[in-house]
Amino acid sequence: MVLDSAGIGEMPDAADWGDAGADTLGHILEQRKVSLPNLQRLGLGNITPLKGLPAVASPIGSYGKCTLKSDGKDTTTGHWEMAGVILKQGFPKFPDGFPDRIIDRFVAETGVPGVLGNVPASGTEIIKQLGEEHVATGKPIVYTSADSVFQIAAHEEVIPIDRLYEICEIARKILHGDDEVARVIARPFLGTNSANFKRTENRHDYAVPPPSDNLLPVLSNAGLDVVCVGKIASIYDNIGVTADLVGKNNDQAVDSTIEALNADSRGLIFSNLVDFDMLYGHRRDPEGYAKALEEFDTRLPEIMAAMKDDDLLMITADHGNDPTKEGSDHTREYVPLIVYGKNARAGVALGTRQSLSDIGQTIAENFGLSIADGVSFLKEL
């Protein structure tokens, strides 16, 4: 389970990324007392000192933290590394918007009457700002974010879904080489004016395909289930995915995870809880983040109760997004690693792992397999 953006303190190179002092979980817990009894029992407070969340003498889980070894601090980079893909050069980002060479070609090849926006922005805010002009002109709204993404927002009654998807496919073909962003994302919305514009569930991601030797196809090619919850399948361009369950928000993702645990399957359930990052990290809302952590903590016993005796739960993150820092970018941080199984050893200090790929290698080794990178900690458990 990936608690999207729940970093646990700056990495040694954080200053090089403009993230000196970043500490997503640490700074959130400094704002007020955050009630996380279940995460505390599992060992969250044993990883590093956290205000109001002391270490426990006998945690029921094992604990540590992972280094992000790849060049990046975004969704795709973190998730790919978990599956054994180490990026030596990160995906390109466009903090000043996309250059004319991209936009001019996009307009020419899609046949749209121009674009609006072309800035880094919050997806909910930009449709409030430019949605009415889009409806009046028919020009799609193009924007990016702290991630390596080319996002296209359009009203479903102005640019129908099939047409929006076609436009995104053209953009995906344009964006290659030095401009190969990790994802092109269709962001449709509905409503009558800026006061009630709302994004719909018809979002669709067009991701760069990951290398074929990553954890997901390694498992599925061996006849194992790879059940993805939330945005996981799109991050891996659906390669190696055997089932894709809905997870538009944290609660829905937990519901789908429990559904998958109760199903007759063998392999991997890979879940992303997106609200931490999307709703609270990027929007710099530490109180909202704190409440979301508390809400997840209350649901942990449901997840644990649904686990079979030989299941192993791994809770981690893909990067940081400290809501107390200026701006809206992700932050270069270690991520927590909490591991629990009814028959697994408890209280093992897993230390500072040198890569998120240790997670993937551990999962692979459990099934007698191996991936390209990572050091398994299975024997320690």
Image (cartoon, rainbow, N blue to C red):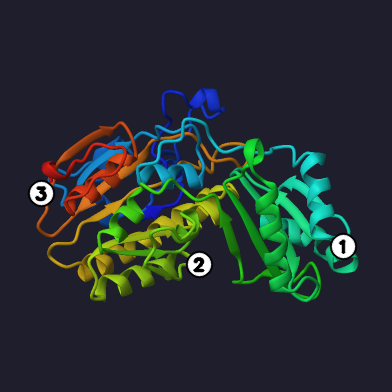
Q: Secondary structure at mark 2?
A: loop
Q: Image quadrant of residue 85?
A: top left
**How many residues crowd around disc 3 within 10 Å: few (fewer than 14), some, or many (20 or more)?**
some
Residue 65 seen in this snapshot: yes
Residue 232 relative to residue 83: left or right:
right
Q: Is residue 187 above or below residue 284?
A: below
Which residue is tagged 2?
Answer: 248
Instruction: Report x, y in % for residue 367.
Output: 18, 54
Q: Which residue in the structure is indicated by mark 3? A: 345
Q: Position of residue 341 (x, y in %)?
A: 16, 57
Q: In terms of depth relative to the viewer, which is nearer, 216 or 260?
A: 216
The part of the image, by quadrant, that contains residue 294 is bottom left
Residue 343 lies left or right of residue 44; in this view the side is: left
Say if 133 sits above or below 375 in the image. Answer: below
Q: Residue at x 56, y 37 (%)?
A: 325
In the rendering, at what x and y percent does residue 12 appear?
A: 42, 23
Three-letter residue code for mark 3:
Arg
User: Which label sits on residue 133?
Assistant: 1
Which numbered tag is attached to residue 262? none
Query: In the displayed structure, does residue 136 sit left or right of residue 218?
Result: right
Can I make out residue 6 in this image?
no
Identify residue type, mark 2. Answer: Lys
Of the 4 image quadrants, the one containing the N terminus is bottom left
Q: CA distance from mark 2 to mark 3?
A: 33 Å
> Gap in Å between the C-alphas at discs 1 and 2?
28 Å
Graded by Cα atoms within 10 Å as few (under 14), some (14 to 19) or many (20 or more), the crowding at tag 1 reads some
